[in-house]
Amino acid sequence: GFEAVRETVRSYTPEEAEVVTGVPAEAIRQTAREYATTPKAGIFYTLGITEHTHGTDNVYALSNLVLMTGHLGKASAGMNPLRGQNNVQGANDAGASPVFFPGYQRVDDPEARAKFERAWGVSLPERPGMNLNEMMKAVGQRILGLYVMGEDILLSEPNVGRLEAALNRIEFLVLQDIFLNETARFADVVLPAASFAEKDGVFTNSERRVQLVRKAIEPPGAARADWEILMEVANRLGAEWHYRHPSEIYDEMAACAPKFAGISHERLRKVPGLQWPCTSPEDPGTPYLHRGGILRGKGLFQPVVYRPSVEREDIEFPLILSTGRTLYHYNAATQTRRAAGPVARQPEAFIELHPSDAKRRHIETGDLVEVHSRRGAVRCRAVVSRQVRKGCAWMPLHFAEARANLLTVDAGDAVTGTAEYKVCAVEVTKVEGTYE
Protein backbone atom coordinates (compact mmCIF):
# COMPACT_ATOMS: atom_id res chain seq x y z
CA GLY A 1 0.00 0.00 0.00
CA PHE A 2 2.99 2.35 0.04
CA GLU A 3 2.44 3.68 -3.50
CA ALA A 4 -1.19 4.45 -2.66
CA VAL A 5 -0.05 6.43 0.39
CA ARG A 6 2.56 8.26 -1.69
CA GLU A 7 -0.07 9.26 -4.24
CA THR A 8 -2.58 10.31 -1.58
CA VAL A 9 -0.22 12.59 0.33
CA ARG A 10 1.18 14.20 -2.81
CA SER A 11 -1.52 16.86 -2.72
CA TYR A 12 -1.06 17.61 1.00
CA THR A 13 1.83 20.05 0.92
CA PRO A 14 3.23 21.44 4.19
CA GLU A 15 1.68 24.78 3.24
CA GLU A 16 -1.77 23.22 2.94
CA ALA A 17 -1.22 21.36 6.21
CA GLU A 18 -0.36 24.67 7.87
CA VAL A 19 -3.76 26.07 6.88
CA VAL A 20 -5.55 23.10 8.46
CA THR A 21 -3.41 22.62 11.58
CA GLY A 22 -1.92 26.03 12.33
CA VAL A 23 1.55 24.43 12.49
CA PRO A 24 4.06 26.38 10.35
CA ALA A 25 5.04 24.60 7.14
CA GLU A 26 8.74 24.89 7.89
CA ALA A 27 8.24 23.30 11.33
CA ILE A 28 6.45 20.37 9.63
CA ARG A 29 9.37 19.91 7.21
CA GLN A 30 11.97 20.10 9.96
CA THR A 31 10.13 17.64 12.22
CA ALA A 32 9.58 15.18 9.35
CA ARG A 33 13.26 15.21 8.42
CA GLU A 34 14.42 14.81 12.01
CA TYR A 35 12.00 11.92 12.61
CA ALA A 36 13.00 10.14 9.40
CA THR A 37 16.77 10.45 9.84
CA THR A 38 17.29 9.90 13.57
CA PRO A 39 18.46 6.35 14.44
CA LYS A 40 15.71 5.78 16.99
CA ALA A 41 12.38 7.58 17.24
CA GLY A 42 9.13 6.65 18.95
CA ILE A 43 5.65 8.08 18.48
CA PHE A 44 3.63 8.48 21.66
CA TYR A 45 0.02 9.54 21.33
CA THR A 46 -2.94 10.01 23.64
CA LEU A 47 -6.68 10.67 23.40
CA GLY A 48 -6.04 13.92 21.51
CA ILE A 49 -5.40 11.70 18.50
CA THR A 50 -8.27 9.24 18.91
CA GLU A 51 -11.21 11.30 20.23
CA HIS A 52 -12.25 12.55 16.80
CA THR A 53 -14.65 11.35 14.12
CA HIS A 54 -11.47 10.68 12.12
CA GLY A 55 -9.52 9.20 15.04
CA THR A 56 -8.81 5.92 13.26
CA ASP A 57 -7.45 7.84 10.28
CA ASN A 58 -5.21 9.81 12.65
CA VAL A 59 -3.73 6.56 13.96
CA TYR A 60 -3.36 5.18 10.42
CA ALA A 61 -1.42 8.31 9.47
CA LEU A 62 0.96 7.84 12.40
CA SER A 63 1.43 4.14 11.61
CA ASN A 64 2.28 5.06 8.00
CA LEU A 65 5.11 7.24 9.34
CA VAL A 66 6.42 4.41 11.52
CA LEU A 67 6.34 1.91 8.65
CA MET A 68 7.96 4.13 6.03
CA THR A 69 10.82 5.13 8.35
CA GLY A 70 11.43 1.69 9.88
CA HIS A 71 11.05 2.97 13.42
CA LEU A 72 9.64 -0.25 14.89
CA GLY A 73 10.76 -3.58 16.30
CA LYS A 74 13.49 -2.01 18.45
CA ALA A 75 13.99 -0.07 21.67
CA SER A 76 12.95 3.60 21.80
CA ALA A 77 10.79 3.28 18.70
CA GLY A 78 7.39 2.16 17.47
CA MET A 79 3.81 3.31 18.02
CA ASN A 80 3.09 3.86 21.70
CA PRO A 81 -0.52 4.66 22.63
CA LEU A 82 -0.83 6.12 26.13
CA ARG A 83 -4.25 4.81 27.11
CA GLY A 84 -6.91 6.86 28.83
CA GLN A 85 -7.02 4.73 32.00
CA ASN A 86 -5.03 2.04 33.76
CA ASN A 87 -5.82 -1.44 32.44
CA VAL A 88 -7.61 -0.27 29.29
CA GLN A 89 -5.14 -2.56 27.54
CA GLY A 90 -6.06 -5.45 29.82
CA ALA A 91 -9.79 -4.91 29.34
CA ASN A 92 -9.41 -5.03 25.56
CA ASP A 93 -7.10 -8.04 25.82
CA ALA A 94 -9.85 -9.85 27.74
CA GLY A 95 -12.51 -9.13 25.11
CA ALA A 96 -14.27 -6.04 26.54
CA SER A 97 -15.07 -5.08 22.97
CA PRO A 98 -18.03 -5.62 20.65
CA VAL A 99 -15.67 -6.87 17.92
CA PHE A 100 -13.29 -9.28 19.67
CA PHE A 101 -13.23 -12.29 21.92
CA PRO A 102 -10.23 -12.49 24.32
CA GLY A 103 -6.90 -12.30 22.55
CA TYR A 104 -8.23 -10.17 19.67
CA GLN A 105 -10.03 -13.04 17.96
CA ARG A 106 -12.86 -11.64 15.91
CA VAL A 107 -16.48 -12.34 16.81
CA ASP A 108 -17.31 -12.84 13.11
CA ASP A 109 -14.55 -15.46 12.63
CA PRO A 110 -16.37 -18.84 12.58
CA GLU A 111 -13.35 -20.76 13.89
CA ALA A 112 -12.78 -18.38 16.80
CA ARG A 113 -16.48 -18.34 17.64
CA ALA A 114 -16.69 -22.14 17.62
CA LYS A 115 -13.69 -22.36 19.94
CA PHE A 116 -15.26 -20.04 22.52
CA GLU A 117 -18.66 -21.73 22.20
CA ARG A 118 -17.02 -25.04 23.12
CA ALA A 119 -15.10 -23.48 26.02
CA TRP A 120 -18.08 -21.59 27.44
CA GLY A 121 -20.85 -24.03 26.54
CA VAL A 122 -23.11 -21.38 24.99
CA SER A 123 -24.11 -20.13 21.54
CA LEU A 124 -22.49 -16.81 20.61
CA PRO A 125 -23.59 -14.06 18.20
CA GLU A 126 -22.24 -14.18 14.67
CA ARG A 127 -21.92 -10.41 14.32
CA PRO A 128 -20.19 -7.76 16.45
CA GLY A 129 -22.39 -5.88 18.90
CA MET A 130 -22.81 -2.17 19.50
CA ASN A 131 -19.91 0.01 20.52
CA LEU A 132 -20.33 2.32 23.52
CA ASN A 133 -21.39 5.36 21.52
CA GLU A 134 -24.00 3.32 19.66
CA MET A 135 -25.30 1.89 22.94
CA MET A 136 -25.68 5.32 24.53
CA LYS A 137 -27.66 6.55 21.51
CA ALA A 138 -29.94 3.49 21.77
CA VAL A 139 -30.72 4.03 25.47
CA GLY A 140 -34.45 4.58 25.95
CA GLN A 141 -35.20 3.12 22.50
CA ARG A 142 -33.68 -0.27 21.63
CA ILE A 143 -32.01 -0.46 25.04
CA LEU A 144 -34.34 -0.36 28.05
CA GLY A 145 -32.00 -1.89 30.62
CA LEU A 146 -28.41 -1.00 31.54
CA TYR A 147 -25.72 -2.59 33.69
CA VAL A 148 -23.07 0.07 34.34
CA MET A 149 -19.76 -0.92 35.93
CA GLY A 150 -17.04 1.47 37.04
CA GLU A 151 -18.17 4.45 35.00
CA ASP A 152 -20.22 7.58 35.55
CA ILE A 153 -21.87 7.82 32.15
CA LEU A 154 -23.60 11.10 33.03
CA LEU A 155 -20.20 12.77 33.21
CA SER A 156 -18.11 10.74 30.79
CA GLU A 157 -20.36 10.31 27.73
CA PRO A 158 -20.83 13.01 25.07
CA ASN A 159 -24.04 15.03 24.73
CA VAL A 160 -25.16 13.90 28.17
CA GLY A 161 -28.27 16.09 28.09
CA ARG A 162 -29.74 13.71 25.51
CA LEU A 163 -28.52 10.69 27.49
CA GLU A 164 -30.01 11.98 30.76
CA ALA A 165 -33.40 12.40 29.11
CA ALA A 166 -33.11 8.87 27.70
CA LEU A 167 -32.35 7.38 31.14
CA ASN A 168 -35.81 8.52 32.24
CA ARG A 169 -37.28 6.17 29.63
CA ILE A 170 -35.49 2.93 30.53
CA GLU A 171 -36.98 0.19 32.67
CA PHE A 172 -34.03 -0.89 34.82
CA LEU A 173 -30.51 0.29 35.61
CA VAL A 174 -27.87 -1.51 37.70
CA LEU A 175 -24.85 0.45 38.90
CA GLN A 176 -21.76 -1.44 40.14
CA ASP A 177 -19.12 0.90 41.55
CA ILE A 178 -17.04 1.73 44.60
CA PHE A 179 -18.82 5.09 45.19
CA LEU A 180 -22.18 6.61 44.37
CA ASN A 181 -21.93 8.97 41.40
CA GLU A 182 -24.18 11.06 39.14
CA THR A 183 -25.49 7.98 37.31
CA ALA A 184 -26.58 6.50 40.67
CA ARG A 185 -29.51 8.94 40.64
CA PHE A 186 -31.12 6.72 37.98
CA ALA A 187 -30.12 3.35 39.44
CA ASP A 188 -32.71 0.81 40.54
CA VAL A 189 -30.01 -1.36 42.13
CA VAL A 190 -26.54 -0.39 43.36
CA LEU A 191 -23.97 -3.18 43.83
CA PRO A 192 -20.96 -2.13 45.95
CA ALA A 193 -17.68 -3.11 44.30
CA ALA A 194 -14.16 -3.49 45.68
CA SER A 195 -11.36 -1.10 44.74
CA PHE A 196 -8.06 -2.17 43.18
CA ALA A 197 -6.46 -2.47 46.63
CA GLU A 198 -9.21 -4.78 47.85
CA LYS A 199 -9.00 -7.55 45.25
CA ASP A 200 -6.64 -9.90 43.45
CA GLY A 201 -6.16 -9.93 39.69
CA VAL A 202 -3.97 -8.59 36.91
CA PHE A 203 -3.51 -5.24 35.22
CA THR A 204 -1.98 -4.89 31.76
CA ASN A 205 -0.28 -1.64 30.79
CA SER A 206 0.35 -0.05 27.39
CA GLU A 207 3.55 -2.00 26.76
CA ARG A 208 1.48 -5.22 27.00
CA ARG A 209 3.00 -6.06 30.38
CA VAL A 210 0.67 -8.23 32.48
CA GLN A 211 1.27 -7.60 36.19
CA LEU A 212 -0.18 -9.25 39.26
CA VAL A 213 -2.32 -7.19 41.63
CA ARG A 214 -2.60 -8.50 45.19
CA LYS A 215 -5.30 -7.67 47.69
CA ALA A 216 -3.88 -5.40 50.41
CA ILE A 217 -7.00 -4.95 52.56
CA GLU A 218 -10.47 -6.48 52.82
CA PRO A 219 -13.35 -4.73 51.02
CA PRO A 220 -15.57 -2.67 53.35
CA GLY A 221 -19.07 -3.76 54.26
CA ALA A 222 -20.88 -5.71 51.55
CA ALA A 223 -18.44 -4.72 48.79
CA ARG A 224 -17.06 -7.53 46.63
CA ALA A 225 -14.67 -7.91 43.71
CA ASP A 226 -16.31 -7.38 40.32
CA TRP A 227 -15.85 -11.01 39.28
CA GLU A 228 -17.57 -12.23 42.45
CA ILE A 229 -20.54 -9.94 41.89
CA LEU A 230 -20.91 -10.96 38.25
CA MET A 231 -20.64 -14.63 39.13
CA GLU A 232 -23.42 -14.40 41.70
CA VAL A 233 -25.68 -12.41 39.37
CA ALA A 234 -25.07 -14.96 36.59
CA ASN A 235 -25.77 -17.90 38.89
CA ARG A 236 -29.01 -16.35 40.10
CA LEU A 237 -30.01 -16.14 36.44
CA GLY A 238 -29.33 -19.84 35.93
CA ALA A 239 -25.62 -20.09 35.14
CA GLU A 240 -23.32 -22.50 36.90
CA TRP A 241 -20.09 -20.59 37.41
CA HIS A 242 -17.87 -21.89 40.18
CA TYR A 243 -14.68 -19.84 40.06
CA ARG A 244 -12.83 -19.70 43.37
CA HIS A 245 -10.17 -17.16 42.43
CA PRO A 246 -9.45 -14.77 39.52
CA SER A 247 -6.46 -16.94 38.60
CA GLU A 248 -8.94 -19.58 37.38
CA ILE A 249 -10.64 -17.02 35.16
CA TYR A 250 -7.30 -15.98 33.67
CA ASP A 251 -6.36 -19.61 33.04
CA GLU A 252 -9.63 -20.13 31.17
CA MET A 253 -8.93 -17.09 29.00
CA ALA A 254 -5.32 -18.10 28.34
CA ALA A 255 -6.42 -21.57 27.25
CA CYS A 256 -8.43 -19.98 24.42
CA ALA A 257 -6.09 -17.10 23.52
CA PRO A 258 -2.67 -18.15 22.17
CA LYS A 259 -1.19 -14.69 22.85
CA PHE A 260 -1.57 -15.31 26.61
CA ALA A 261 -1.06 -19.08 26.74
CA GLY A 262 2.23 -18.81 28.65
CA ILE A 263 0.93 -16.39 31.29
CA SER A 264 -0.59 -17.43 34.62
CA HIS A 265 -0.94 -16.00 38.11
CA GLU A 266 1.46 -18.68 39.34
CA ARG A 267 4.13 -17.54 36.92
CA LEU A 268 3.49 -13.84 37.59
CA ARG A 269 4.20 -14.37 41.29
CA LYS A 270 7.83 -15.08 40.34
CA VAL A 271 8.48 -12.27 37.86
CA PRO A 272 7.69 -8.52 37.70
CA GLY A 273 5.43 -9.03 34.70
CA LEU A 274 5.23 -10.73 31.30
CA GLN A 275 4.65 -9.04 27.97
CA TRP A 276 2.44 -10.78 25.43
CA PRO A 277 2.66 -12.51 23.02
CA CYS A 278 3.77 -15.16 25.49
CA THR A 279 2.72 -18.45 24.00
CA SER A 280 4.11 -21.11 26.35
CA PRO A 281 5.29 -21.50 29.96
CA GLU A 282 8.89 -21.33 28.66
CA ASP A 283 8.33 -18.17 26.58
CA PRO A 284 10.02 -15.14 28.25
CA GLY A 285 7.52 -12.79 26.59
CA THR A 286 7.92 -10.14 23.89
CA PRO A 287 9.47 -6.84 24.99
CA TYR A 288 9.46 -5.44 21.43
CA LEU A 289 6.75 -6.25 18.91
CA HIS A 290 7.83 -6.79 15.30
CA ARG A 291 11.51 -7.20 16.24
CA GLY A 292 11.93 -10.11 13.83
CA GLY A 293 9.60 -8.62 11.23
CA ILE A 294 5.97 -7.54 11.04
CA LEU A 295 3.82 -10.11 12.85
CA ARG A 296 1.21 -10.21 10.07
CA GLY A 297 3.91 -10.82 7.41
CA LYS A 298 4.14 -7.40 5.77
CA GLY A 299 3.30 -3.97 7.08
CA LEU A 300 0.02 -2.57 5.77
CA PHE A 301 0.03 1.07 4.68
CA GLN A 302 -3.32 2.85 4.87
CA PRO A 303 -3.97 5.83 2.56
CA VAL A 304 -5.67 8.59 4.56
CA VAL A 305 -7.79 11.36 3.05
CA TYR A 306 -8.31 14.44 5.22
CA ARG A 307 -11.84 14.86 6.54
CA PRO A 308 -12.79 17.88 8.65
CA SER A 309 -14.42 17.43 12.04
CA VAL A 310 -18.19 17.16 12.12
CA GLU A 311 -18.71 20.52 13.79
CA ARG A 312 -17.05 23.79 12.84
CA GLU A 313 -17.17 27.29 14.26
CA ASP A 314 -19.59 29.89 12.86
CA ILE A 315 -20.93 33.33 13.76
CA GLU A 316 -23.15 31.99 16.57
CA PHE A 317 -20.53 29.61 17.98
CA PRO A 318 -17.14 31.07 16.99
CA LEU A 319 -14.83 29.13 19.34
CA ILE A 320 -13.64 25.52 19.09
CA LEU A 321 -13.80 23.74 22.47
CA SER A 322 -11.65 20.77 23.39
CA THR A 323 -12.21 18.79 26.59
CA GLY A 324 -9.96 16.62 28.71
CA ARG A 325 -8.47 16.05 32.15
CA THR A 326 -6.37 18.05 34.57
CA LEU A 327 -3.37 16.81 36.51
CA TYR A 328 -5.32 16.71 39.77
CA HIS A 329 -8.46 14.76 38.85
CA TYR A 330 -9.11 11.39 37.25
CA ASN A 331 -11.84 11.06 34.62
CA ALA A 332 -15.27 11.62 36.20
CA ALA A 333 -13.52 12.42 39.51
CA THR A 334 -15.63 9.87 41.39
CA GLN A 335 -12.53 9.13 43.46
CA THR A 336 -10.38 12.27 43.31
CA ARG A 337 -13.10 14.73 44.34
CA ARG A 338 -13.36 12.76 47.58
CA ALA A 339 -9.69 13.45 48.35
CA ALA A 340 -8.71 16.71 50.06
CA GLY A 341 -5.41 17.13 48.23
CA PRO A 342 -6.68 17.14 44.62
CA VAL A 343 -9.71 19.22 45.59
CA ALA A 344 -7.48 21.84 47.21
CA ARG A 345 -5.36 22.10 44.04
CA GLN A 346 -8.29 22.06 41.60
CA PRO A 347 -11.54 22.82 43.44
CA GLU A 348 -13.85 23.88 40.60
CA ALA A 349 -14.55 23.80 36.90
CA PHE A 350 -13.03 26.34 34.52
CA ILE A 351 -12.61 27.18 30.86
CA GLU A 352 -9.35 28.39 29.37
CA LEU A 353 -9.53 31.22 26.82
CA HIS A 354 -6.81 32.88 24.76
CA PRO A 355 -6.15 36.50 25.88
CA SER A 356 -7.40 38.00 22.60
CA ASP A 357 -10.65 36.00 22.75
CA ALA A 358 -11.14 36.93 26.41
CA LYS A 359 -10.47 40.63 25.74
CA ARG A 360 -13.03 40.71 22.92
CA ARG A 361 -15.61 39.36 25.38
CA HIS A 362 -14.51 41.60 28.31
CA ILE A 363 -13.61 38.48 30.31
CA GLU A 364 -10.85 38.25 32.91
CA THR A 365 -9.50 35.33 34.93
CA GLY A 366 -11.94 34.49 37.73
CA ASP A 367 -15.02 35.85 35.97
CA LEU A 368 -18.12 33.67 35.90
CA VAL A 369 -18.99 32.74 32.33
CA GLU A 370 -21.60 30.70 30.51
CA VAL A 371 -20.42 28.34 27.81
CA HIS A 372 -23.01 27.56 25.11
CA SER A 373 -23.00 24.93 22.36
CA ARG A 374 -25.69 23.63 20.04
CA ARG A 375 -26.57 21.03 22.69
CA GLY A 376 -26.45 22.81 26.04
CA ALA A 377 -24.86 25.34 28.35
CA VAL A 378 -22.81 25.29 31.56
CA ARG A 379 -21.40 27.91 33.93
CA CYS A 380 -17.85 27.95 35.24
CA ARG A 381 -14.91 30.26 35.96
CA ALA A 382 -12.75 31.70 33.20
CA VAL A 383 -8.98 31.31 33.06
CA VAL A 384 -7.21 33.55 30.56
CA SER A 385 -4.23 31.60 29.25
CA ARG A 386 -1.84 31.32 26.32
CA GLN A 387 -1.98 27.54 26.74
CA VAL A 388 -4.79 27.60 24.18
CA ARG A 389 -4.65 28.99 20.66
CA LYS A 390 -6.62 31.98 19.51
CA GLY A 391 -10.10 30.84 18.53
CA CYS A 392 -9.94 27.79 20.81
CA ALA A 393 -11.01 26.98 24.36
CA TRP A 394 -10.45 24.10 26.77
CA MET A 395 -12.48 22.60 29.66
CA PRO A 396 -11.99 19.66 32.05
CA LEU A 397 -14.66 16.96 32.20
CA HIS A 398 -14.49 16.23 35.95
CA PHE A 399 -17.14 18.49 37.47
CA ALA A 400 -20.77 17.45 37.90
CA GLU A 401 -21.88 21.05 38.55
CA ALA A 402 -20.41 22.16 35.19
CA ARG A 403 -20.57 19.11 32.96
CA ALA A 404 -18.41 19.73 29.90
CA ASN A 405 -20.16 16.85 28.15
CA LEU A 406 -23.42 18.76 28.08
CA LEU A 407 -21.66 20.65 25.30
CA THR A 408 -19.87 17.94 23.33
CA VAL A 409 -20.81 16.20 20.08
CA ASP A 410 -21.87 12.55 20.10
CA ALA A 411 -20.80 11.93 16.50
CA GLY A 412 -18.39 9.00 16.48
CA ASP A 413 -15.48 7.58 14.53
CA ALA A 414 -16.73 5.33 11.72
CA VAL A 415 -14.56 2.38 12.85
CA THR A 416 -14.35 2.61 16.64
CA GLY A 417 -17.36 4.75 17.51
CA THR A 418 -15.17 6.96 19.72
CA ALA A 419 -16.90 10.31 20.15
CA GLU A 420 -15.47 13.63 19.06
CA TYR A 421 -14.67 15.03 22.50
CA LYS A 422 -11.93 17.26 21.11
CA VAL A 423 -13.92 19.48 18.74
CA CYS A 424 -17.20 21.27 19.34
CA ALA A 425 -18.26 24.83 18.55
CA VAL A 426 -19.11 27.11 21.48
CA GLU A 427 -19.59 30.70 22.54
CA VAL A 428 -18.56 32.10 25.93
CA THR A 429 -20.29 35.03 27.62
CA LYS A 430 -19.66 36.78 30.92
CA VAL A 431 -22.53 36.45 33.43
CA GLU A 432 -23.40 37.44 36.97
CA GLY A 433 -24.31 35.05 39.78
CA THR A 434 -23.07 31.58 40.68
CA TYR A 435 -22.95 28.19 39.02
CA GLU A 436 -24.64 25.20 40.62
Image (cartoon, rainbow, N blue to C red):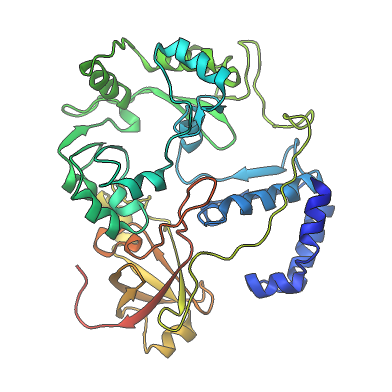
Q: Quadrant of the C terminus?
A: bottom left
Residue 34 at x, y = what percent?
80, 58
Relative to 128, say whether 17 is above or below: below
Relative to 118, say whether 393 is above or below: below
- Residue displayed at 72% across by 52% down: 303
Q: Quadrant of the N terminus?
A: top right
- Residue displayed at 77% across by 29% down: 297
Residue 265 at x, y = what percent?
47, 15
Q: Is residue 265 visible?
A: no
Viewer-side residue, 292 vs 20: 20
Residue 125 at x, y = what percent?
44, 25
- Residue displayed at 64% across by 22% down: 285
Residue 360 at x, y = what percent?
43, 90
Quarter assignment of residue 366: bottom left
Answer with left or right where residue 86 lies relative to residue 13: left
Viewer-side residue, 375 vs 320: 375
Quarter assignment of residue 282: top right
Quarter assignment of residue 272: top right
Q: Is residue 198 visible?
A: yes
